[in-house]
Image: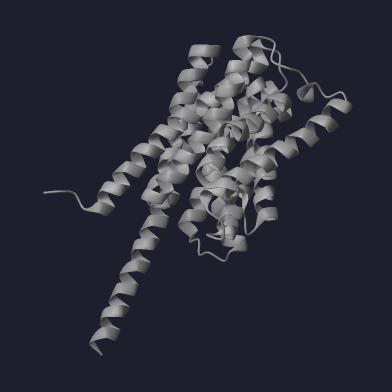
Amino acid sequence: MSEHPAHQNSLQGMAIMSGAMLILPVMDAIAKYMATFEAMSPGQVTFYRFFFQVACTLPILFALFGLKALSARRPWMNLLRGVLHGGASLLFFVAVKYMPLADVFAIYFVEPFMLTAMSALFLGEKVGWRRWMAIVVGFGGAMIVIQPSYEIFGLKALLPVACAFLFSLYLFLNRAIGEADSPLTMQTMAGIGGTLFMAAALLVGSSSGNADFSVSLPASGLGLVLLLALGSISGYAHMLIVRAFRLAPLSLLAPFQYFEIISATVLGYALFNDFPSFSKWIGIAIIVASGLFIIWRERLQAQSLKSSSTREYRINSSS
């Protein structure tokens, strides 16, 4: 007996999402490698991340869809998404230059809490006291990770929090745009927006003498290959995520973002000899548990609303 199509799609979506989440930290490991061993500034790495993303994906998009790939009904909002994504990526890459990968990811995972709070405050979505408590507890877990990092790295330990805020705004805009534009168009326009933003940021930052914005070319052939890989991973991994969201519900896929901490920890230890301390693992566990609780509550609420709608439909049909 064959599986129900919806169930099969969900399984495919979960598999694709898992793969994407395990792959994405490779991009951040490359950024840290370029800063550590190739002496390339985070600003320059971020520029190349978006530039090579567009360079790798745009020819394929044009070949498949022609100029329609850039035909957006809300171009400025999509470009703003790119600016927000560019800013978030920049903050993340600056953070991984100075901090262990797993620490940065752990602190960054306050993003689901921020998005939930934004949805409640600005979209009027109902968030019960249990989820508010989970948000508070999750931020408490982040503080456990931030506290020792702050003592070592100072204000740089807060960069992942700022990154999470910008990325929350980026996701918030996704909801605002809705289905006005296709995911393919949104991805392309965001890449262009991120490239333009980082070009301007590099110009301003390098002019002010900020070392994190110094302009340079790859110092070696390996560096160039890694930057090409950086852009490719960024573009194609996000396309995998878009594909996964088309196959399975958001609430089902959301927990898989925590898979990133697995590959981030492995890569951090293998490449940079970084490994979270016991106290940081406690903080990571609290963050993940709080995030999973929020996701579970959202799914429970969605099921409750669906059941209520079904009962109401049956009552109306029988009357």
Q: Is residue 273 above or below residue 3?
A: above
Q: Residue furthest left?
A: 1
Q: Where the C terminus falls, by quadrant?
A: bottom left
Q: Residue furthest right?
A: 208
- Give the side of residue 182 with respect to residue 150, left or right: left
Picture coordinates of residue 138, whole percent (x, y): 52, 43
Could you tell me if residue 136 is visible in this image?
Answer: no
The residue under the point 56% across, 21% down is 29
User: 147 or 240, which lies in front?
Assistant: 240
- Give the side of residue 253 with respect to residue 112, left or right: left
Picture coordinates of residue 196, whole percent (x, y): 74, 39
Picture coordinates of residue 269, whole percent (x, y): 49, 15
Picture coordinates of residue 75, whole percent (x, y): 67, 54
User: 221 or 25, which lies in front?
Assistant: 221
Q: Is residue 194 above or below residue 114?
A: above
Coloring scheme used: one colour
Q: How many marks?
A: 0
The residue under the point 65% across, 10% down is 37
The residue under the point 80% across, 36% down is 200
Could you tell me if residue 161 is visible in this image?
Answer: yes
